[in-house]
C-alpha cells in the first residue's frame, strides 16, 4: 500500500513538472531546452519536499511508538517489582513455618525418646519381678480381669444356660515351671512299648482324644491371634499321654493317620465356633510325616479338607522342620495339593536357623516357629547364614511370619522385641488349656471329686461350645508394661 502511494506521488510530481514546462514554453515563449530545465528543477524541488515531509511524518510516528513502548516497559518493571516483593514475603513465611515445624518435630522426637527409655526401664523392672515370681519369692492371688485376657471365648447360643463356663481357677498364679510340670504330673507311669501301643489303640478306638489349645499372641500387645491344637490321649484310667510319648508308637502301629483325621475334624469344629465371634482367629493343627507320606490316609485328609476349603485362610497345617527337609516325591505332591486348595503351612521343631525362605514360601509355608532360646543363642550368629536379629525381616520379604515359641520369662520378651518378632507363644502367656468333655453341663460339667483337676477329663469342652481354663494371672507390673507398650 505504501509503495502504490509513493508511485502515485512520483507520477503526480512528474506531471506537475511537465505541465509547468509546457506552460512556460507556450505562454512565456521560452525555448524548449530552457522549459525542460525549469521543469526538472521544479521536479527536483518537489521530490525534495516530498522526502522531507515523509521523513518528518515518520519521525513523528516512531516517536509516538517509542513513547508507548517506554510506558509499557515502565508498567512491566512495576509489575515485576511487585511480584518480587510478594515472592520475598512468601519465602519468609515458608522459612518461618519450616523453622517452627522443625522445632515441634525436635520436641516430639525428644519426648518419644524419653518415653522409649521409660518403657525399657519398665520392661527391665517387670523382668526382674517376673524372675522373683518364678523363684517363688512372691505369689499374688489371681485377678479375674487378667485371667480373661487370654480366655478362649465360646459362641453365645442365646441363653445363659447354654453359655460355656470357665474351668475353676487356681488359688495362686503358677509359675511357668510349675505350669510345664502340671501335665507331666498326670501322665501315665513308664510302660513297655506293647503296653503303650495297647493304650494308644484303646484311646483311639474309644475316642479318648483330647484337644488342648495354647494361644499365640502378638508382640508387644499380647493380643491372641492364633491357637495351636495340642493332642493328648487318655488311657482307660484317664491318665494323660502326651504327644511326645505316643506319636512314635502310633506311627509304628499305623494309628497316627486315624489320630490326625480325628484331630483335624475337631479342630475344624472348634474353628467354626471361634469364627462366629472373631473372623481373624486361626488354628494351627499338627500333621505327622507319616500321614503326609501315606497315600490312603492322606486321601481321607484331603477329602475332608476339600470339604472345608472355605476355612483354609484360618486353618494352618503344621509340620516339623525335619519333615520339610526330607520330602520325597509323594510328600511333595501332597503338599502341592494342599497348597493348591489354599491351605497354609507352618514349620515347628526348628533345630537350626539354616532356612531357605524362598523355597519354603514357594511350597506354601507362611509361618515358622523358632524356640526363643534358639533365637537368643549367641552361638547361632556363627553357625547360621544370617544373624537371628535379621531373620524376621528376611522371612517377611517372602510373606513368612516368625513366631517365637517356648517363651517363659519377661526378659526373653524384651530381647525378642529387638529382633522384630511379631508373634509369641509360651507358658509366659498361657499353657495349653484343655477343652471340656462332650456332654459336660453348661455350669461346669465336672463332678465334685474332679472339679479341681487342671488337666483332667472334666475340664475339656464340648466341640459345639469350646472354652478353656483361664491363663495364669499376669502381675500388675506386667499389665502396666503392656499398657505402656501399646493397646492389647
Image (spheres, rainbow, N blue to C red):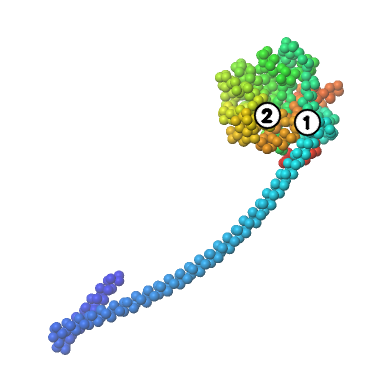
Q: CA distance from mark 2 to mark 1?
A: 25 Å
Which of the 4 quarters of the picture holds residue 453?
A: top right
Q: Is residue 468 visible?
A: no
Residue found at the far top of this picture:
194
Residue 374 position, x and y percent, is 68, 29
SS of the residue under disc 2: helix
Residue 285 relative to residue 138: left or right: left
The C terminus - image quarter: top right
Q: Residue at x 68, y 32 (%)?
A: 376
Q: Earlier in the sequence, mark 2 or mark 1?
A: 2
- Residue occupied by mark 1: 471
- Residue occupied by mark 2: 374
Q: Residue at x 86, y 21 (%)?
A: 449
Q: Residue at x 72, y 31 (%)?
A: 407
Residue 429 position, x and y percent, is 75, 32
Which of the 4 quarters of the picture holds residue 232?
A: top right
Report how many numbered discs are placed on residues in the image. Answer: 2
| Mark 2 residue crowding within 10 angstroms, few (<14) / some (14–19) / many (20+) | some
Are the residues at dot 2 and dot 1 in contact (C-beta closer than 8 Å)?
Answer: no
Residue 304 position, x and y percent, is 64, 22
Residue 308 relative to residue 56: left or right: right
Q: Nearer the viewer, mark 2 or mark 1?
A: 2
SS of the residue under disc 1: loop
| Mark 1 residue crowding within 10 angstroms, few (<14) / some (14–19) / many (20+) | many
Q: Residue at x 75, y 39 (%)?
A: 123
Q: Is residue 327 visible?
A: yes
Amino acid at each position: 500500500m505504501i509503495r502504490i502511494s509513493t508511485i502515485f506521488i512520483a507520477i503526480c510530481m512528474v506531471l506537475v513538472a511537465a505541465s509547468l514546462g509546457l506552460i512556460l514554453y507556450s505562454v512565456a515563449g521560452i525555448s524548449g531546452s530552457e522549459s525542460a530545465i525549469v521543469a526538472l528543477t521544479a521536479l527536483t524541488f518537489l521530490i525534495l519536499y516530498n522526502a522531507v515531509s515523509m521523513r518528518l511524518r515518520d519521525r513523528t510516528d516512531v516517536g509516538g511508538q517509542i513513547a508507548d513502548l517506554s510506558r509499557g516497559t515502565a508498567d512491566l518493571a512495576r509489575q515485576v517489582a511487585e511480584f518480587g516483593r510478594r515472592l520475598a514475603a512468601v519465602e519468609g513465611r515458608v522459612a518461618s513455618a519450616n523453622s517452627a515445624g522443625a522445632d515441634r518435630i525436635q520436641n516430639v522426637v525428644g519426648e518419644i525418646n524419653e518415653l522409649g527409655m521409660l518403657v525399657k526401664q519398665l520392661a527391665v523392672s517387670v523382668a526382674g519381678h517376673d524372675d522373683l515370681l518364678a523363684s517363688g519369692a512372691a505369689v499374688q492371688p489371681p485377678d479375674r480381669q487378667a485371667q480373661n485376657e487370654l480366655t478362649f471365648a465360646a459362641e453365645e447360643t442365646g441363653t445363659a444356660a447354654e453359655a460355656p463356663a470357665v474351668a475353676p481357677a487356681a488359688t495362686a498364679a503358677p509359675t511357668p515351671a510349675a505350669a510345664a510340670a502340671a501335665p507331666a504330673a498326670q501322665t501315665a507311669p513308664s510302660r513297655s512299648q506293647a503296653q503303650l501301643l495297647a493304650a494308644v489303640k484303646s484311646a483311639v478306638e474309644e475316642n479318648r482324644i483330647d484337644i488342648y489349645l495354647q494361644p499365640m499372641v502378638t508382640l508387644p500387645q499380647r493380643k491372641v491371634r492364633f491357637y495351636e491344637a495340642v493332642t493328648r490321649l487318655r488311657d482307660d484310667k484317664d491318665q494323660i499321654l502326651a504327644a511326645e510319648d505316643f506319636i512314635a508308637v502310633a506311627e509304628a502301629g499305623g494309628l497316627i493317620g486315624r489320630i490326625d483325621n480325628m484331630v483335624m475334624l475337631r479342630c475344624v469344629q472348634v474353628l467354626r465356633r471361634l469364627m462366629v465371634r472373631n473372623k481373624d482367629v486361626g488354628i494351627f493343627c499338627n500333621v505327622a510325616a507319616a500321614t503326609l507320606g501315606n497315600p490312603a490316609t492322606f486321601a481321607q485328609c484331603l477329602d475332608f479338607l476339600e470339604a472345608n476349603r472355605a476355612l483354609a485362610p484360618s486353618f494352618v497345617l503344621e509340620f516339623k522342620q525335619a519333615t520339610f527337609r526330607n520330602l520325597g516325591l509323594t510328600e511333595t505332591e501332597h503338599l502341592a495339593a494342599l497348597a493348591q486348595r489354599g491351605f497354609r503351612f507352618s514349620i515347628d521343631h526348628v533345630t537350626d536357623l539354616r532356612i531357605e525362605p524362598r523355597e519354603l514360601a514357594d511350597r506354601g509355608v507362611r509361618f515358622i516357629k523358632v524356640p526363643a532360646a534358639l533365637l537368643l543363642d549367641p552361638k547361632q550368629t556363627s553357625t547360621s547364614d544370617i544373624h537371628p536379629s535379621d531373620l524376621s525381616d528376611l522371612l517377611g520379604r517372602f510373606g513368612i511370619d516368625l513366631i517365637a515359641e517356648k517363651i517363659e520369662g519377661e526378659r526373653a520378651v524384651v530381647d525378642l522385641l529387638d529382633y522384630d518378632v511379631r508373634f509369641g507363644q509360651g507358658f509366659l502367656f498361657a499353657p495349653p488349656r484343655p477343652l471340656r468333655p462332650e456332654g459336660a453341663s453348661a455350669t461346669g460339667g465336672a463332678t465334685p471329686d474332679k472339679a479341681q483337676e487342671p488337666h483332667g477329663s472334666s475340664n475339656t469342652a464340648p466341640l459345639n461350645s469350646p472354652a478353656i481354663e483361664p491363663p495364669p494371672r499376669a502381675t500388675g507390673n506386667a499389665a502396666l508394661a503392656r499398657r505402656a507398650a501399646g493397646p492389647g
